[in-house]
Image (cartoon, rainbow, N blue to C red):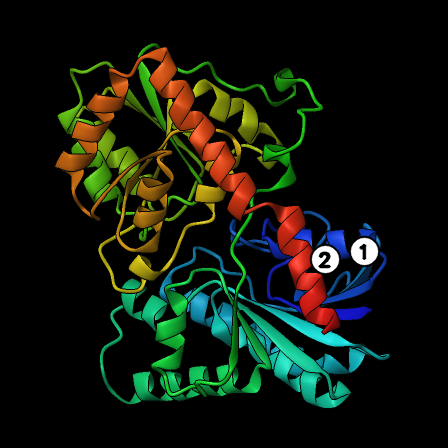
Amino acid sequence: MNILIVSQYFYPEDFKVNDIAFDFVKRGHKVTVFTAKPNYPQGKFYKGYSFFSKSREYIKGVEVIRVPIFPRLDSTNKFLVINYLSFVFFAYLFKYRVKGEFDVVFAQQASPILSVLPAIWFKNKFKIKLYTWTLDLWPESVLANSNLKEGFLLRQLNKLVKYIYDSSDVILISSNFFKDSILNKGVNINKKIVYFPNWAEDVFTHKLDCDKNTFNLPVLPKGFNIMFAGNIGESQDFESILKAVKLTEGDEINWILVGDGRKTSWIRSEIESKKLKNIFLLGRYPLESMPYLFKQADAMLVSLKDSPAFSLTVPAKVQAYMASSKIILGMFNGEGQILINNSKCGFAVNAGDFIGLANVIREVQTFTIAEIAEMENNSKQFYDKHFSKKRLFQDLEKLFEN
């Protein structure tokens, strides 16, 4: 097959669409990616890229066509809007760069949903089917992360979302809870909606093939270490996490934050003003180093704010934690909470319940070696059964072929 992928984000940016592109080349398919100049999440162009440079390149057998974009800069709402709109604007101007014949077009719909518009243009141009992989619900995500209220803008956004879903031949959803939300927008009930969840990157499932000393990793402090890995942003409810940190000050419990994001400076100031001694900001490390860091942790943390939009989603880090055979402690609502509790790989409390989170951490802290081993084994077995990349990609390939 000749597959066209449309995504605002692509390698060297770290998104799941990278795996799809590179793996399908290995499966013998031709893959072309239409994307933007990489600038996520730092807000500036990656080394070797600029507004005008590198409009076409080949990466691991994938032809990559890049259009200019205004970078995110400090990721405040103003610059995010400019960033989102500029991708659509320049994609329209440079869509002529995509030539040839294609069998399917696949769109990764992370934020913003606007990024699917070029895929619709290509669907109509090449008269092929459009598969839209929904990773982020709109407008729910916008409402959860902004001050947007009911009114003209929201009505127009709802119309745009419905248009994009109606234009898609198949809607792939990363969470089962997404289905009702999509249908409630007035999308045709007969529209084909297929569950296609996230998976863990290969570094979490393959044998470690490099020396951990390569990454100059820190040694974690003595005690029970809970690790959060990923984006440190508004959605993750660090206000509640820091309250749990405060509650566990005298319990030999350490909170390790790996990553970076818009909330990092605020957390650093809170640590200083509240004189918190049991939380550590390690900063960003390469993806390849994550298995070594995870191995040092006693349990992994995932959290989201109390929001209708967030209760419908399962953060991708859950699959990475499971693939690494880790105990997972969660503070969020909805499908993610159900997944963790039902798989018996950890404990998840309601969003914002920092007291409950502190209590389950103290409980896990008392586990025997046998109890820890059982829960870690549950985590890996659940991953292998439900989120194996090999099985998911086989299903996606059959979907394309059919």
Residue identifier under label 1 = 25
Is residue 195 left or right of 240 when viewed as pictured? right
Q: Percent x, y for residue 312?
A: 34, 61
Q: Amino acid at mark 2?
A: Ala
Q: Amino acid at mark 1?
A: Val
Q: Residue at x 46, y 14 (%)?
A: 219
Q: CA distance from mark 2 to mark 1?
A: 7 Å
Decide: few, some or many residues near mark 1? Use Cα within 10 Å; few <14, some 14-19, many ≥20: some
Tell me the SS state at disc 2: helix
Residue identifier under label 2 = 21
Front one among 337 and 273: 337
* Residue 272 occupies quadrant: top left
Residue 138 in sight here: no
- Of all residues, the one furthest to the top in this rendering is 222
Q: Percent x, y for residue 212?
A: 62, 18
Q: Residue at x 18, y 16 (%)?
A: 251
* Residue 119 occupies quadrant: bottom right
